[in-house]
Structures are given as C-alpha cells and as structure tokens.
Amino acid sequence: MIDALFSTDHKVIGVRTAVTALLFFLAGGVLALLMRSELAEPGLQIVSHQGYDELFTMHGSTMIFLVVIPVALAFCLYLVPLQLGAANISGARWALVASWLISLGGVVMWLGFLTREGAGSAGWYAFDPLSDTPSTPGTGMDLWIWGVVLATTGAIIFGWCVLITILRRRAPGMTMLRMPVFTWTAFATSLLVIFSFPSLVVGMALLWLDRRGLTTLSPITYQNLFWFYGHPAVYVMFFPFVGMAAEAASVFSGRRFFGYRAFVPALLGFTVLSLSAWAHHMYTTGAVPVEVFTLTSTALIVPAGIEYFDIIATLWRGSIRLTTSMLFVLGFLVQFLVGGLSGIFVASPTLDFQSTDTYIVVAHFHYTLFAGSVFALFAGVYLWWPKLTGRRLGERLGRVHFWLMAIGTNLTFLPQFVLGYDGMARRLPDYPAATGWQGLNVVSTVGSFLIAVSVVVFLLAVAGSFLRRRDATPDPWGTGCSLEWAAPSPPPRGNFAAPLPPVRSYAPLADLREGRAREDEAVAVPA
Amino acid sequence: MSAVVATAPLALLYAFGLGRAPARRRSWAAPAWFAGLVVLAVATSPALERAADRQLSMHMVQHELLGLVAAPLLAAGAPVRLALAASGHATRRRLARLLHARVVVALTHPAAGAAAFAGVLLAVHVPAVYDLTLRSGAVHAGVHAALLWSALLLWIGLLGADPLPRRVSITATIAALVVAMGAMAALGATLAAEQHVVYAPYARPGTDALADQRVAGGLMSVGGMAVVVPLLLALAWRALVAEERRAAVRERRGLPAEGAR
C-alpha cells in the first residue's frame, strides 16, 4: 500500500496517475450524462442555469486538466523508460510529487461543489471578465483556479522528467533516430508541455489577483495567455495517442512502423507549428491578425497528413489481427478524420465567425478528443495491458466495449454538427420547443448513455482480467518491435531481467526475429 | 545611390580576394555573398526608404530583408575564411590571433548573437526610439546598421561558415533560434494586437494606419517563422542524422556505443 502511494518507480507513478485519471473520467462522465439528460427535452428539468454552468465547466475542466492530459503523461512516464531500455525515469522523486500535485489539484477543483456558490462556472477556459468576482463570485471559482494551477504544475514537472529521461537515459546504441514512435511522440509532448504550460499558470495567477481586486487583467491578455497554453495542450492531448495508435497498428499488422523517417520530422514540424496557432481560438475577438493564424493553423494539415499516411501504410499489406486494440485503432483513424476535417472549417475565419460557440465546435472537439484521442487511448490500454499486469484483458468483452462505444460516440456527436448548423448555441441548458431540435438532442442523449454502458463493459473486462492467471510472456502478442516487449510482464523494479537485445534500429526486436541483429551482442541495462 | 556606394566596395574587395585565393572546389560562399550584397542594396535603396517612411508594413519588410535575408547570406559568404585563404603567411597569423581573441570568442557565441539580435530588434521598435528614426536620417541609418550587425552576429555564430574558435552545440543553436523567433513573434503579435497606432508619424489623414500596422505585425511574425522554422528543423534533423551515422560507424568497427558503460 505504502509502495503504491509513495514509490519512486516510474511504473507505479504512471499507473497511479492513470487510475486517478480514470476515477475523474468516471466523475466527469457523470456530469456529461446530467447535461445530456437536461438537454433531452426543452425546458429545465434537472438543473438550474447556474447548475448547468457548473456542469459544463467542471465536465470540460475535469476531462482536460484531470483526465486526458494526466493520462497522456502517465503513459509517457510508464512507457518511455521501458522503450528506451532505462531502469527508471529521471527525477523520479519529482515525478512522485507531480503525480500527487495532479491528484490534489483535482480534489481542490471538485471541492468547489461543497461551497455555497457552487463549483467553478465560467467555462473551462474561464475568460475574464466572466470569471472575475462580480460575474462569478464565490470560493468555488477560486478553488477551480488553484486546482488548475496545481494540476498544471504537476504536468510541467512530468514534462521535464520525460524530456530529461529521453535526453539522458537511452540504452547504449539507442540513438535518437532509433527511439520508438511512441517515445518520439512523448518527446514532442514534453517539449510542448514545457514551453506552453507555464503560460497557463501565469494566466491563472493573474486571474486570481484580478479576482482579489489587486490588479486589473486585460481580457485579451488573458485570452492570449490562456490559448498560448490551450492550443499546444490540444496536441499534448493528441501526440501520445497518435503514438499509441501507431504502436498498436505496428504490433497488430505484424510489421515495423512504416515511414519512420517521415514521421519524426513531421512530428517535429507539428510541434513547432502548434506553438504558433493559438490565436485561431480568438478570431472573433477582432484583436488578432486572422490571416497569420489561418496560415499557421491550416499548415498543420501537412504534418498531420504525413502521420496519418504512415499509420495507414503500416496497415497496408500487413498480416492484420483484428484484436480489440486494432479495432480501436481503426475507430481512431475514421473518427479522428471527422474531427480533423471539421477542424479545417473552424480554422477558416469566414466559417469560424458563423460557427463559434455553436454545437459545431462542441461536435468538432469531441470528435478529436473523445472519438480520436480516447479511442487511441483504449487501443493503447488493450495493447499494453498484458505488459502492465501480466494478465490478458478479455477480448470478447473488449469487442462489445468497442462496438458500443463506437456506436454511442457517433450517435452522441454526429447530430451535434447538425444542431450547430441549425444554430443551437453551446452552454445553454434549455431551448425553445419550436426550434425542432428535440429529436436530434434525444438521439445525442441516447448515444451518451450508450457510451456510459460501454465504459461499464470496460470496467467489467478489467475486473475479469484480475480473476485470470498471470501468464503473459515478455512479448504476449509475438510481434512487438520495441524494447518494452523484452522486459518481463509485468516488468520488475529496474525493468529488465536479462541483458538488452542490441539496438540497431527503431525496431530491435523485429531485427532479432528477422536475423538482422545477433543475440550475442546483447548489452547490459544501464543503471 | 547610397546603397551602391556602400555595397560596391564590399563586392570588389570580395572579388579581389577570390582572385588571390588558391582555386577552391565549387562552394556556395561566393554566390551567397553577392546575393547578400544585392539584398542589402535593395533593402537600403531610396525607393524602399521612401515607402518605409510612409508605411510601417514596408518598414518591417525592410527590417526583415536586413536581418533575415541579407545577414544570413553575408554570413554564409564567409568573408573571413576567404581573407585567410587570400592573405600571406604573416597576415594569416595575425587574423588567426584576432579570431581567438577573448572578445571575438564571446561575441560569436550563439547566446551573444541571440541576445544582440533580440535586444536590438525590440529596442529599435520602442515608440520613442522609432519616432526619432523617422525624424533623423542619421539615426535611421544607425538603426539599420545596428539591425544588420546584430543579425550578422547571430548568423555568423549559427551558420559557422566562417572559422569559429569553437564548435557550437545543436542545443545552443536551437535555443538561439528560438530566442530570435520569439523576439520577432512577440514584436509582431504586439503590433498586430494594438488597437491604436503605435508610431504616431504614420497616423496621417487619408491612410488607414491601423490596418497597415496589423499587416506589419503579421509580416514580422510570419517572416520570422518562415525563415527560422525550416532552418530549425533542418539543423535538428541534420544533428539527428549525424548521431545515427556516428553510431553506425562505431558498430561497423565493433566499438562500444557512445556513452556505454
């Protein structure tokens, strides 16, 4: 018990961070179900206007600050040392502190529900002056600010730990250009976290001072600070998941990842570009040069296209096994495409001026974050579960989980494009019956409950897995390419039981299988 | 005219050096040098000067031509390397000693170059300084010289076409480029976001100075990114490939990997 809470082993920290994120995922999901239930018919049935404001604020904040970003970094923390052939993360004690900061931030943020005025209710981006004291009074909003600060500080520390591990702890022979694809995405993620997340901490500090009446915060300054964090954060919630999908595609196609030398520069270009696209969230403020940010935002298509192409080309002519993980990869590919293509629409100022703050935006980012990233996350969960636990995760329940979730997701979010097109604004608990929006809203609500059922199925599969024997070999799928599949399942403290296979490419295990490297060249694990 | 006066001697001097130096294999240095001089002449040509006095956006184009086009081209021209090759034994020794002088070592470090570049860029765009340059021709010329020389420092350190006293690490290179780009982006974003005309002399009746200022800001940030981002990626990629190649060579020779214990 003490070990699970205070170990400095990167695997323990990673798993605990991910489990905390799962708990917040369930909590944030309940808030979503409440919102969908409220929207199922015109009028107010379940919550008040103020209550609804709290629901969407806390749903968005929880999912972004406490679920998707932490789980992305938790996977980096768990997998990067294993993929590099290292015994632990750099700055392990810092990482331990960071994981507790994130949990503490979550608790602080949710404590707002216990205050008289309720939890934070100014939206997940808490634009000033909506978030100042006259508009949103109460301790709940202050708790929200400090929750965000704590969670983001934790994320920044995680980012540094991952970056330094990659720079300093690679096994002998593991040049940068031999790092597995997921580790490359972790590298890009850590750079983004380090560059952009401090901007949010500054923004939150200024917002808090503004709420105390100590300073006056300019709304545009706040938005610039927020989105300089907020847009790169979108890629923090995307890159590691692309990496997971890429690794799963490679394992279940039985071949090494295609186009590695196109993927890596594309990813690096993606990283730099993503730092320069933030103000496309601010077109309608009239305070940013829209031409510049249209250019940088639209240019993001190029690296994204290269990454997509590489994943699809990995599947091409592979011996594909349609495991649950692979199903989630395919779901990710199809659904993220919808999210990405609708992103081109909102990157264009002329269309964005029409669609801003409508359900089109809601549908767009749920297709990227939920239908995209979360599907890739589940691909990763099913792929690495035997590595983490030494046990299989039920394939039959997994398939049910996938199909329910895929149907539920599209039922929930596809109608929202149409609702947005018809003019339904986001963040309102009520709509007039005469608009004729109820039909599509009911479809969307039904879909959201299907998602909830699919999550329950996933939890059943997890419970079932713990009833099985621990029988996973180091490479349970038989087609692993990177070093984590050379470690025992689950890996012991220190990660590797035997000397590492020689690293001659980004797929050392495939090299061994195909006779491109010799086993007797194995090297000792660096301490 | 003034532009030709300034650049013609530099072209002649370089050509004289080329004539004296022993014939070398084809290199990009000479074309880069002459192209740099042409850009310098264009950037300081009377036509562009007049346009820059009327419109902030044209003035930003001028500054970017100096700092982002002329300066890297001139640095790639490697005049010191040519001077070393073209001069006699004694001069060469004196030049080499000068190159290892402590002040030269310090100035050619990318940190110094990046600091000079960012510092000069931000300083000359402070409204009080800027308004002064619009009033006095001498100050204006001085500002342009400062922009060009600070940019030269940055690019000499980064490109390493001239012989430098030390090797510059890829981390320092990337950091310097990020600082330079950050300064340009910050300046551009500030100009683009301002709701009033920052430099009063441009606010003349009959012109939309605010719209032009927004364009100027956009040019400053996009120009910086358009030059720096591809260069940054190219340099990073070159370093990655070089590391990979070194490892492959060691493995062929049966040597232990770099950093192996």
Image (spheres, coloured by chain):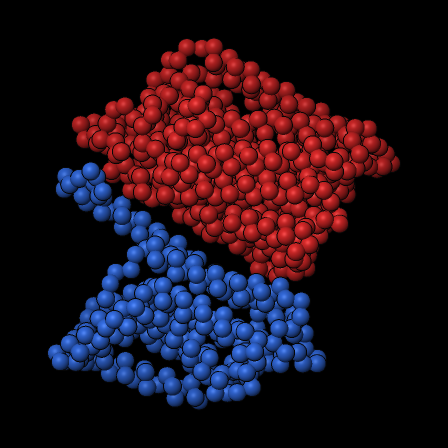
Please state if A395 lies on the left or on the right of A403 as rendered. left
Q: Nearer the viewer, residue A252 or A121?
A: A121
Quarter of the view holding residue B65: bottom left
Task: Indicate the colour of chain B.
Answer: blue
Q: Single out the residue that lies furthest toward the right.
A: A434
Q: Is A23 positioned to the left or the right of B107 in the image?
A: right
Q: Is residue A414 visible?
A: no
Task: Give the answer, above or below, for where A96 lies relative to B108.
Answer: above
Which chain corresponds to the colour red? A
Q: Position of residue B67 (x, y in %)?
A: 43, 71
Compare residues A429 and A298 and report the one nearer the observer. A429
Query: Which residue corresponds to the image point at 50% horizontal and 70% vertical from the top-left?
Result: B122
Q: Is residue A165 above or below residue B239?
A: above
- Horizontally, residue A349 falls left or right of residue B165, namely right
In the rendered view, would you say B130 is above or below B234? below
| Residue lying at 39% horizontally and 43% vertically, measured from the top left | A163
Q: Quadrant of the C terminus of chain A?
A: top left
Q: Residue at x 49, y 40 (%)?
A: A155
- Which of the two residues, A71 or B256, is positioned nearer the viewer here? A71
What is the x, y in percent for residue B213? 61, 70
